[in-house]
Amino acid sequence: MKVSLVELSMRQKDALTVLLTGRGEHNFGDLIKRMVASKKLEFDMICLKQRIGPVGQRFSSTMHYKQQLLEDIVHTYKDAEEIKVYEDRPKQCVIAEASSHPMHQPPEDPLRRK
């Protein structure tokens, strides 16, 4: 986690600061909360992967979980002018690219080979 980037977002009053990880709530929830508290970081949302999603869905992969959550955020904050995602796993940057497509059109599957 880039502490300096989180601190910048914390100071920006019009920013939604989200910690999104594929780490499971059951195994890592307490540890991540302690890490955040030890650095005195504040997030509007801390999202750890659940065994079952809020509407009973099961996620086939961490990428699927993150993509679904990002799409929900984009729909919720549809008037946002900009969404920045900082990802420490380059392979998962594809999720951010797919989620940045206009929501009125389904994004192309970024993992499908042409």
Image (cartoon, helix red, strand yellow):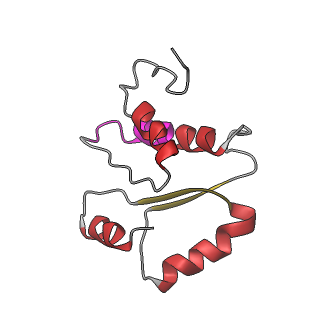
Image coords of residue 67 (percent x, y) = 53, 38
Q: Name the image quarter holding residue 6.
A: bottom left
In the displayed orientation, state which residue is furthest to the front.
114
Tell me if 69 is positioned left or right of 42 in this view: right
Q: Name the image quarter holding residue 74.
A: top left
Image coords of residue 113 (percent x, y) = 54, 19
Observer-nearest of 64 and 14: 64
Q: What residue appears at the point 74 percent right and 39 percent down from the top-left corner?
A: 58
Q: Give the range drawn in magenta.
A: 70-80
Q: What residue appears at the point 61 percent right and 38 percent down from the top-left corner?
A: 64
Q: Name the image quarter holding residue 27.
A: bottom right
Residue 6: within the magenta? no
Observer-nearest of 70 and 77: 70
Above/below status of 30 relative to 68: below
In the displayed orientation, state which residue is furthest to the top.
114
Image coords of residue 44 (percent x, y) = 43, 62
Tell me if 16 is positioned left or right of 51 in this view: left
Residue 76: within the magenta? yes
Image coords of residue 89 (percent x, y) = 50, 52
